[in-house]
Image (spheres, rainbow, N blue to C red):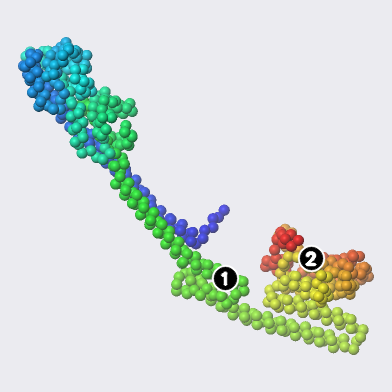
Amino acid sequence: MAIRLSLQARLLLLTALALTPALAILVYNEVSLRSAREAEVHELALRFGQLAAQELEGIVGGVESVLRTAARAPVTRSFDTEPCRSFLSDVQAQSPNLTTLTVIDLEGRVRCRHDMPTSASLLADRPYFKNAIATGGFVVGEYTVSRISGQAGLVMATPIKDETGTIVGVLATGLDLAWLGQRLRGRDLIRGGALTIADRSGIIIAREPQSEQFVGSRIPDMFMPLVQGKNSGSREVLSQDGTRRIIGYVPPAANTAGVYVSAGLSENEAFAPIDRAARRGAALAVTGALLAFLVAWLLGRNMLGRPVQRLVGTISAWRAGDQTIRTGMNARQGELETVGAAIDRFMDELSQRQERQQLLINELNHRVKNTLATVQSIALHTFRGDNSAASSRATFESRLMALSKAQEVLTRENWEGADLEEIVREAVEPHCGDDRARVEVKGPKVTLPPRMALSLAMALHELCTNAAKYGGFSTRRGSVFVEWLLVVEGDEQRLRLSWRESGGPAVVPPNRRGFGSRLIEQGMARELNGEARVDYAPGGVVCTIDVPLAEASSRPLAPTVDEDSERQRQRG
């Protein structure tokens, strides 16, 4: 089914199509910018993570230097408690990032510490102790809570060797997590960003922000593959605090500090400039589109809608009979105005032609009337003095008068057609006078072409004449019922007219067909390619006329039988 669009709707659709490439470019630029920004944020997060890992490598390297130097001191090797305690206190004072330095012998007993415990503490089961003895080198342990002080830290240890290089004990200390957290807080983190440091088992030893909530807890299992991985990288994650971030991570295997480091950048903050630009672009695009549609709508209404309405209104008024109306458009104002000016010129020419045609019609009518008057005058002189022909003369004059009245009806309609109801009433009016109740006329509005109007007028005249002499019009109680309807048979539209008389004298069929009956029956067949039948029923004469409308005129003359039935139903 074809979709009907007005000119204004088409203009709006054209505007939408014109805006589509610009909107597509805007969307493409937004997607490209977001993609480029996403790659940039991933790279930036990874760089931040790597910088934090390098910083931790430096811190751990410093701790390693302190432990190795202290482990080589004679007082440390000798396990001489008091000199060792004094020495370790001095070292401790110079290293605020470290927890208590502890000297442990091979049996795991604490032999030297600036705050020696009151009871013996065995540390032989600690992983860092075992690893330092097993590897013979510096080791970075895990998050550990001291059995002596209860302080948590990232434990680091190195073996103590005598002059022969034999391992005689272990010197251990811990990276102070409070100091590490304070150092992280001193970093200039991007708003919404986060920095997390965990040992190799996934225990968080430092985190900013919200360190008090996360330090000492384990990284969720979904992130453990990052801790256990071998290579650095970046990815988009939903952090434990509910913030969606892009993190750059460095696993313990990828740095010498032996810890996991991740630096996260908030997506909302990272993409905020692009989102603001996108909102501004979208607002400008929507504003521009609305302005474009508004301009298109105004132009469509003023430059298309109003001129078209003016053209249609002018033509409609012309068809309704106002032949003085014009569009008044100037051809220099635009294309539609050129059409309007052309229509005005056409209407002017058509008016002139109609005036000439009206003059010709009036002249023709005048001559026809003169001809009818001449014929009437000839008949009058021909039958003068012949008393036996008086009845024939009266009949001839009445028929001539009926033809004249039908001609007058056609003249009023400029010979374009005649209304059937008007033809019927013109025929019966002389016989019913003021008593209109004697005649009932019923039927839809039908416009007859000229030839059919004349033929039916003559037939109705003959029926009225016979009714006045012998039938329904010959008595005071008599009446006539005239009804017609339209039917459709195949592709043909037909008119069926019925004449019924009642209340008159009893009908006696004539011995022979008179001129009137032959005029009705033969005239319909000859002139209109139809048929007519006169039945002399005892209760009154019935005449049925059936003619095709299309036989007389190809122009639409009347509604179809469905429309006729609906109108009869409403009247009834």
Kindly identify the amino acid type of the residue bearing the numbered disc 2: Glu
Quarter location, residue 193: top left
Q: Quadrant of the C terminus?
A: bottom right
Residue position for label 1:
315
Disc 1 packing (10 Å; few <14; some 14–19; many ≥20):
many
Q: Can residue 269 be seen here?
A: yes
- Distance from the alpha carbon under mark 2 to that under mark 1: 36 Å
Q: Label 2's element?
A: strand
Quarter location, residue 482: bottom right
- Tell which residue pokes out farthest to the front in this image: 118
Residue 477 drawn above or below residue 381? above
The residue located at (29%, 25%) in the rendering is: 218
502 vs 69, left or right, is right
The residue located at (91%, 86%) in the rendering is: 387
Q: Position of residue 571 (x, y in %)?
A: 74, 62
Q: Position of residue 123 (x, y in %)?
A: 19, 14
Residue 482 drawn above or below residue 292? below
Q: Nearer the viewer, residue 494 or 247?
A: 247
Q: Position of residue 376 (x, y in %)?
A: 81, 84
Kindly identify the amino acid type of the residue bearing the numbered disc 1: Ile
First-in-chain label (2 vs 1) = 1
Q: Nearer the viewer, residue 311 or 339?
A: 311
The residue located at (88%, 68%) in the rendering is: 503
Residue 264 drawn above or below residue 164? below
Residue position for label 2:
483
The residue located at (20%, 27%) in the rendering is: 177
Q: Label 1's element?
A: helix
